[in-house]
């Protein structure tokens, strides 16, 4: 087994496993040679169903997604995508360039397209009770709680419900830049979109996914695990939450 020196833990997010394999997955650790921890999200995630909320309107960006689309490069940082060099990924997993995430066009805008899953919140039992996100240091199980929030809760606490993880390259501006970034995610089949904030590094490479979403975000987008979404930047000042079509 390849060993990495004194790096922060990548815990496997493994679903549909036997109890023995699930315990083994929880104990396996990869170490990340950058200042911060990360996550390895390998095996298939179960579909997530979230109940309908109350009648109060949840947080929404008042204009369509094109008004908050900011491309794939921002302030010298980039949305991870296939072929793009990633020193953070190399330090963590020995892979020089991002292997997944194809470039695509949607309504005249360039996006990164790839498979997604979900993580965090009280239903993610593979995450340790005190495991924290590599970017913000928040306890992942405490996010998206309650799992079925009323819209009033989404209005009051959008940061707890609209978050994500990718295999970010921390260079050149560091993790602190990503903590302030805003990520625009679009369902290409429906036009549904959300604005999210990075909280963690991942997923792992085995399942060929590019992005992990909060349970609320994957529900709002109308997606299931291993379906595809489009990813780009939004301006850092963009409110978190749903984007009006």
Image (cartoon, helix red, strand yellow):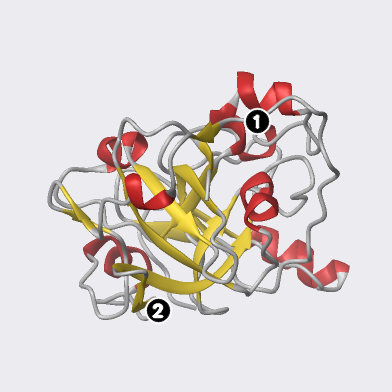
**Residue 126 drawn at (x, y percent):** 73, 54
Per the image, the residue denoted by label 2 is 100
The residue at the point 78 percent across, 58 percent down is: 48
User: Could you say which is closer to the camera, residue 232 or residue 55?
Assistant: 55
* Element assignment for label 2: loop
Camera-side mark, 1 or 2:
1
The residue at the point 78 percent across, 65 percent down is: 47
**Residue 91 drawn at (x, y percent):** 29, 64
The residue at the point 42 percent across, 50 percent down is: 65
**Residue 37 drawn at (x, y percent):** 43, 47
Say if mark 1 contacts mark 2, CB within 8 Å: no
**Residue 20 drawn at (x, y percent):** 83, 70
The residue at the point 65 percent across, 55 percent down is: 218
The quarter of the displayed image where residue 189 is located: bottom right
Q: Residues within 10 Å of mark 2 (few under 14, many from 20)?
A: some
Q: Is residue 25 left or right of residue 207?
A: right
Q: Earlier in the sequence, mark 1 or mark 2?
A: 1
Per the image, the residue denoted by label 1 is 58
Q: CA distance from mark 1 to mark 2?
A: 32 Å
Q: Is residue 166 left or right of residue 151?
A: left
Q: Is residue 121 left or right of residue 4?
A: right
* Rendered image: mark on residue 119: none
């Amino acid at each position: 087994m390849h060993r990495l020196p004194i790096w922060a833990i990548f815990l496997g997010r493994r679903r549909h496993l036997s109890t023995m394999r699930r315990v083994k997955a929880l104990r396996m650790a990869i170490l990340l040679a950058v200042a911060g921890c990360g996550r390895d999200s390998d095996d298939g995630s179960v579909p997530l169903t979230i109940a309908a909320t109350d009648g109060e309107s949840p947080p929404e960006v008042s204009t369509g997604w094109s008004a908050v689309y900011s491309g794939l490069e921002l302030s010298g940082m980039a949305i991870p995508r296939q072929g793009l060099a990633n020193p953070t990924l190399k330090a963590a997993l020995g892979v020089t360039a991002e292997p997944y995430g194809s470039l695509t066009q949607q309504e005249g805008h360039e996006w990164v397209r790839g498979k997604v899953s979900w993580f965090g919140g009280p239903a993610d039992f593979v995450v340790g009770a005190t495991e924290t996100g590599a970017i913000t240091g928040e306890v992942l199980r405490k996010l998206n709680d309650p799992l079925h929030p009323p819209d009033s809760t989404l209005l009051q606490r959008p940061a707890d419900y609209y978050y994500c993880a990718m295999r970010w390259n921390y260079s050149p501006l560091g993790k602190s830049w990503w903590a302030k970034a805003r990520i625009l995610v679009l369902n290409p089949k429906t036009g549904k979109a959300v604005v999210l904030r990075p909280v963690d590094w991942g997923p792992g490479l085995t399942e060929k996914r590019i992005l992990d979403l909060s349970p609320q975000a994957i529900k709002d987008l109308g997606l299931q695990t291993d379906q595809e979404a489009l990813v780009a930047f939004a301006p850092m000042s963009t409110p978190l939450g749903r984007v009006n079509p």
